[in-house]
Image (spheres, rainbow, N blue to C red):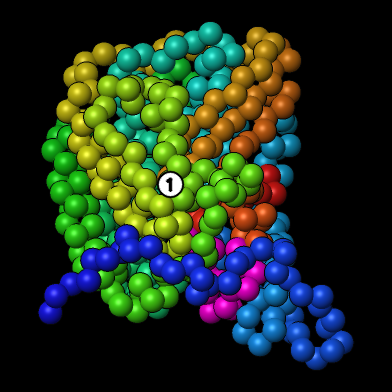
Amino acid sequence: MKKNNSFDQSPDRSKYPENGPDNKPDIDLSSGKYSKVWQGPNHPGVTGNMSLELTLCGDEIVDAKTHVGYLHRGFEKLFERRLYMQVMPTCLRMCVPESDTNEYCFAEAVEELSGIEAPEKAKWLRMLVLEMSRLQMLLRVVPGQGGAFGLGIGVQWGMYVRELVLDLFEELTGGRVYHMYMLPGGVRGDLPEGFRERAQSVMDEVFRFAERIDNVMFTNSVFKKRAIGTGYIDPSWVDQYGIVGPNARAAGYKRDIRKDHPYLRYDQLDWEVPVLENSDVFTRSRIRWMDMQVTASLIGQILEKMPEKGSFKAPTPNALNWRIPKGETYVKAEASRGEFGYYVVSDGSAYPRRIMLRGPSYTHAIALLERLLIRANIADVGAIMVSLQTCPPEIER
């Protein structure tokens, strides 16, 4: 049987209704024509504990409102009441599945304000951890898109390979989910003996998984029929809504902070940013599938180019009496979901004056999601939300 690999075939947009508030009817709930339902806060098609208030006409959504606040809340104010080093274990909860991006942004911000530079070896180790974090996230999200349509086998495969990556995290940092490995001044430790060889073996497994998921999911006629044309993001919305990461690159925008504004040692790596143009659920999932393989390749390059010897931690003041000089800075990084940044202000005391986080979920999971759901079928709500890859704690932070 010949495979149908026409994933890049542009769907006929005339078959799909345009999403957006301009297509909302005047809703009169007393007419009996419309009904109100809730999806979440605990639902397999909701990426975290948030809730969607949906107004339906039959099985078509005519209005959608997001309700957040069912998970972690008020992080930014918690930060301001903690010593700088006490912020580290708290900031990880801003996005539990991708905690390392928080570690890096906050540690780098403290270093910039303090005039401290992490050693060369620490920069490579940080880059390794960030890419491992991206990889384990993608191993959940890529097959998870199939799971949103009822294709469960890919999820089990992906979770197995993700466990192999978490084994590497545990070996390197002592933790599987929260690591607190990147601290102001550098990192907590060097690579264990034999780590490079074991990590490369896991990357080989990632490439094998990518091939299997391509055969089972992306050439699956049911998945293609459900995903192609669903949740279409018009490219003109990208700048209007502040869309970033895979959601922007699936709409034809070649944007990646690692390339556009290189940090750490990304400018010493050889890779290309994946870009596609159809901008629907299928294309966003395909971009992440491509990202997964690029990330595995980058990890191999990092392990090969990383210095064998060298310090991994610069001297820092006593953590209990560390007063950061007055100033402000903004540090950003490319998470698996797009731009992720920390704005940090110091007033010269031992406590942060202000910390504000810029996460992609605020835009993607409120304004964008509410627009995409108009005229969508209720059966596609979970799949559309999964395709935006949100972390609700970033919203009510």
What amino acid does circle 1 point to?
Gly
Q: Which residue is mark 1?
A: 252
User: Residue 244 at x, y = what percent?
Assistant: 52, 43
Q: Is residue 379 magenta?
A: yes
Instruction: Say which quadrant the C terminus sits in.
Output: top right
Instruction: Say which quadrant the N terminus sits in.
Output: bottom left
Frontmost residue, 182 versus 45: 45
Residues in magenta, as a range: 372-387
Q: Quadrant of residue 130?
A: top left
Location of residue 143 with respect to 239 vertically, above or below: below
User: Residue 246 at x, y = what percent?
Assistant: 44, 48
Residue depicted at 44% across the width and 69% down the height: 12
User: Residue 243 at x, y = what percent?
Assistant: 56, 46
Position of 259 with respect to 79 (left or right) is left
Location of residue 23 with respect to 303 vertically, above or below: below
| Residue 204 shows in the view | yes
Position of 294 with respect to 198 (left or right) is right
Residue depicted at 73% across the width and 15% down the height: 347
| Principal secondary structure, stretch drawn in magenta | helix
